[in-house]
Amino acid sequence: MTNPYKDTPTARYIADRVRDLAHRKTQSEIAAEAGFVNANFMSLLKSGKNKLPLDRVPSLARALEVDPAYLMRMALDQAVGATTAKAIIDIFGTPATENEIGWLNEIRDASDNTDPRLTARSRAVLRGIFGK
């Protein structure tokens, strides 16, 4: 059997997360939490033999303890290809992570919901927070 999704960011990310969580839960436990009937499906995802079904992104994200929006962006690219994934995101917008939503809510609160424009000064301050 070939591994058509072997070199995708999704397969690598899932493999890395399973490895990172190994001290707390087994691959079988992750598979069960994600709702996969066969625990071996995790091996198929990690090796790139199967792509991540889009309808399983929310449950797998919870099981892997990652942001579902981030996992969805990678899964979309894997499922439909970069061009189609870009078109979907262009139409529906970039899925925001939980942390990004927190930042957005704080900006809205701090600006009294005035829809502040991103100026060169505010961009520089924001980038300074991240050391860029």
Image (spheres, helix red, strand yellow):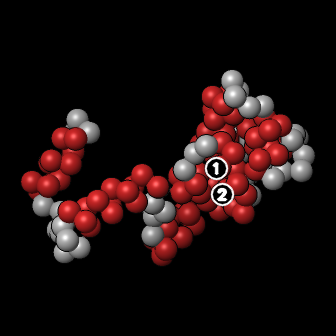
Q: Residue at x 37, y 57 (%)?
A: 102
Q: Residue at x 49, y 74 (%)?
A: 92
Q: Is residue 121 left or right of residue 89?
A: left
State the image coordinates of residue 125 (x, y, percent, origin top left).
Answer: 15, 47
Quadrant of residue 19 within the rendered picture: top right
| Quadrant of the frame with the N terminus | top right
What separation in Å lies between label 1 and label 2 (alpha carbons)?
A: 5 Å
Q: Which residue is mark 1?
A: 61
Q: Is residue 57 above or below residue 14?
A: below
- Of residue 113 and residue 69, the one placed in the foreground of this image is 113
Q: Which residue is mark 2?
A: 58
- Of residue 53 and residue 66, the one placed in the foreground of this image is 66
Within 10 Å of disc 1 (Cα), the crowding (few <14, some 14-19, many 20+) is many
Q: Residue at x 20, y 71 (%)?
A: 112
- Of residue 128 and residue 82, the one placed in the foreground of this image is 128
Q: Is residue 22 left or right of residue 42?
A: left
Q: Is residue 88 above or below residue 75?
A: below
- In the rendering, which numbered label is found on residue 123? none
What's the amino acid at mark 1?
Answer: Ala
| Quadrant of the frame with the C terminus | top left
Q: Residue at x 61, y 39 (%)?
A: 13
| Tag 2 secondary structure | helix
State the image coordinates of residue 127 (x, y, percent, origin top left).
Answer: 21, 45
Q: Is residue 67 left or right of residue 94?
A: right
Asked if labels 2 and 1 touch by Cβ distance under 8 angstroms, the answer is yes
State the image coordinates of residue 34 (x, y, percent, origin top left).
Answer: 76, 50
State the image coordinates of residue 108 (x, y, percent, origin top left).
Answer: 26, 67
